[in-house]
Image (spheres, rainbow, N blue to C red):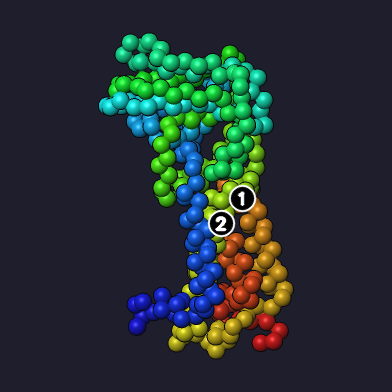
Amino acid sequence: MVQGGFCYTVCIVMSPRTYIVMCLGLILAWWPLGTSAHQPNIVKSVPVLITQPEISRVFYDDLTSGPRTYRIVTTAPWQLYLTILTPWSVVPNYTYDVRVYDVQSRAPIDGTDIFADWSQYYESFAGDWYWHGPEVRRAMPAGTFDIVVSADNQPGTYALAIGEREDFDLASAISAIRSIPEIKSRFLFVSPATFLRSPFGLAYIVIIFGAAVAAGMGYRAYMRRSALAKVSVRASRNIGPVDRAARFSIGAILFIVAVSTTWNPIVLFISGFAFFETFAGWCGLYALVGKSTCPSF
């Protein structure tokens, strides 16, 4: 009876309305995975090695220490696609030079001075605007190639997009979400909180808050059915208005701090649990010690 009891008690306390809400939350959480987007990568070391150049990726980098090199190694013919983007907040008033070299011969295969014809571009994954440069497409043979990015002066940050084939699974989405706050603050010069404008950001909140609510419901159901629980534990509410207001404030503060900095999942989970206790009027810690601050109790 102990094994599986926790899951059983969670199921029996869920009303049809709760099931509907959870299903809608799952739909909202999974729907953004169909959104077209480049896989974001923050360059940590150089040169960058790329073994699948046709997969759509964007590399966030800067030229403060000189030209950057991206090495491509393939064993079969492939289709080259590349373009360069700059932050919307920075006017692109310098000339980028993007050249592709055959490593064996060191001969340039294709080069583009990207300066004119910058256009506006909205990236839906993170909800950001960019300046978008010209695009380069070319059929390439198998081999080893270097993409070298330089500029006529030493500008700040940029994003180099390579490949057009979308390959964005759940693992890639999780990895991308973890990098979004740093990309926004370090490369795009905007607040990480702007990720809330994206369906991916909203889905991330839904998933973590859903986990917090599920944990709260499961713990409450377990405590109510536990033979060791005190009578007061089985009450539907055990916190009064003052405690609920305090929990709401804690949840709101933690939420604001999280989405304004690193989107830390632990901080967001605690925030979601605080909101759960606020609206449920029930505190897990109070239930554990048999305490209640509810005036009507």
Residue pointed to by mark 2? 205
Residue 12 point in image, percent of width and height? 46, 81
Count of numbered marks: 2
- Residue 209 vertical position relative to residue 200 in the rendered view, above or below: below
Q: Secondary structure at mark 2?
A: helix
Q: Residue 146 placed where, x, y %?
A: 39, 20
Q: Quadrant of residue 142?
A: top left
Quarter of the view holding residue 57: top left
User: Residue 112's x, y, as percent?
Assistant: 50, 16
Instruction: Name the residue type under label 2.
Output: Ile
Q: Indicate left or right for 172 with 153 as reference.
A: left
Give the quadrant of the C terminus.
Answer: bottom right
| Sooner in the amino-acid sequence: mark 1 or mark 2 | 1
Outermost residue on the bottom side: it is 231
Secondary structure at badge 1 equals helix
- Near mark 2 (Cα within 10 A), the count class, few <14, some 14-19 or many ≥20, is many
Camera-nearest residue between 283 and 126: 126
Relative depth, front residue between 35 and 241:
35
Does the CB distance between marks 1 and 2 fall below 8 Å? yes
Q: Residues within 10 Å of mark 1 (few under 14, many from 20)?
A: some
Q: Is residue 15 above or below residue 263?
A: below
Please report the residue visible at 51 percent of the width from the left and 77 percent of the height from the top: 16
Q: Which residue is mark 1?
A: 196
Instruction: Give me the residue at 35% from left, 22% from top.
Output: 140
Amino acid type of the residue tagged 1 in the rendering = Leu
Q: In this rendering, is residue 164 above or below 274?
A: above
